[in-house]
Amino acid sequence: MALISAALDRIKPSPTLAMTSRVLDLKAKGVDVIGLSAGEPDFDTPDFIKDAAIEAIRAGKTKYTNVDGTAELKAAIAGKFKRDNELDYAANQISVNVGGKHTLFNALVATIDVGDEVIIPAPYWVSYPDIVNFAGGTPIFVKAGADRNYKIDAAQLEAAITPKTKWLILNSPSNPSGAAYAEAELKALGEVLLRNPQVWVMADDMYEHIVYDDFKFTTIAQVCPALYERTLTVNGCSKAYAMTGWRIGFAGGPVPIIKAMAKLQSQSTSNPCSIAQAAATAGLNGPQDFLIERNIAFKRRRDLVVRMLNEIEGFHCPTPEGAFYVYPDVSGVIGKKTPKGEVIATDTNLIDYLLDEGRVAAVNGAAFGLEPAFRISYATSEAILTEACTRIQQAVAALK
């Protein structure tokens, strides 16, 4: 009798966390390595949010809460959806979870049966297919490369849908590419979905507030109201509010899904941390002006990294509309050799080379389902980014 379950055998450890561990190990040994693999903002949680957490501790708000969120936080989330997305959700349509990953996990595990298919545009966030596999479903990948600015179109979606399709996961702005769907693009996808009523939509909007230039963020239930009853709109506090460690994710959607998620959560984590919920309530209800200031900084970093990577022969780095990642296509360097004579046959080889010789850590494109490419997080200072990109330029220039 096997000790480890078959369900667990269907998943693998997170590649992004694995690279972060490698970076920490090297730094512990005194190696001068620049880590650009972690997907978290370098900004601190705003003081007014931290103050709300301290106040909650002192007020004794340290007990169990409702399984899927306090009434206060659900009200704040409902206000956020109305304010930012023109969506109306009642308290029984909102789920609060231990981070955005937990939200996605609950929703997929609560709804997927063996044989169900889930359409996942590639490149994708690393956890999507593993959660689907864990739940017993089948990930169906639809690839959109740099030539498509990493976005699928209506024809691709139509071709991927079958009678077994249960969900479409739509992440905009995207991790890992930063690509974001404009309103017209969402409407075109929505028309396909309206013709296929068996398909539910999971809108992962975690990077909603991190967008640049003249891009206007919209979510699919907002631009296609007829899909409201088939859409789970997922968001959280981790990225925009720099609250990755606080672990608060949430979703708005149809009552049956929200109830099913609460049922699953009642037998796993129970409620999210009461103090983190108080902090999230303050964050959603409080001043939002700091988001603008931080986006200005992120945009400068984006422009710097895109420019320096596009100066490298063999690299093609589209300019992302949002998030804090770039995803350069590196087709032009595949097949080259390192100074030691080793062939760069894959983007994994390239990432290992950049770490060993350039002392820069990124995440290979294979982890995100579209290669050859890699992901860089530019959620760090311009000085560090300049040094990192210079090291990458020098390392790639040494390839023959």
Image: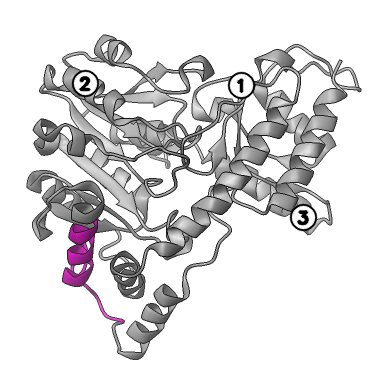
Please state which of residues 181 and 349 is positioned toward the viewer in this rendering: 181
Q: Which residue lies at the image location 32% right of the left edge and 12% below the top edge?
A: 156
- Visible in this render: residue 249? yes
Which residue bears the numbered disc 3? 27
Quarter residue 110 falls in: top left
Q: Pick out the residue farthest to the front.
A: 214
Disc 3 packing (10 Å; few <14; some 14–19; many ≥20): some
Distance from disc 2 to disc 1, alpha carbons, whole Å, reads 30 Å
In this view, the residue in front, 94 or 274, is 94
Against 104, residue 180 (above or below) is: above
Query: Does the residue at mark 3 contact the one at mark 2 (Cβ under 8 Å)?
Result: no
Give the distance between the C-alpha atoms of the residues marked 1 and 3, in whole angstroms: 28 Å
Which of disc 3 and disc 1 is earlier in sequence? 3
- Residue 227 vs residue 346, the one in the foreground: 227
The magenta segment is 62-80
Q: Identify the residue under disc 1.
A: 329
Give the Cα separation between the discs numbered 3 and 2.
Answer: 45 Å
Q: Position of residue 335 (x, y in %)?
A: 75, 11
Residue at (33, 17) in percent of width and height: 153
Amino acid type of disc 1?
A: Asp
2 or 1: tag closer to the N-terminus? 2
Which mark, by number, is residue 165?
A: 2
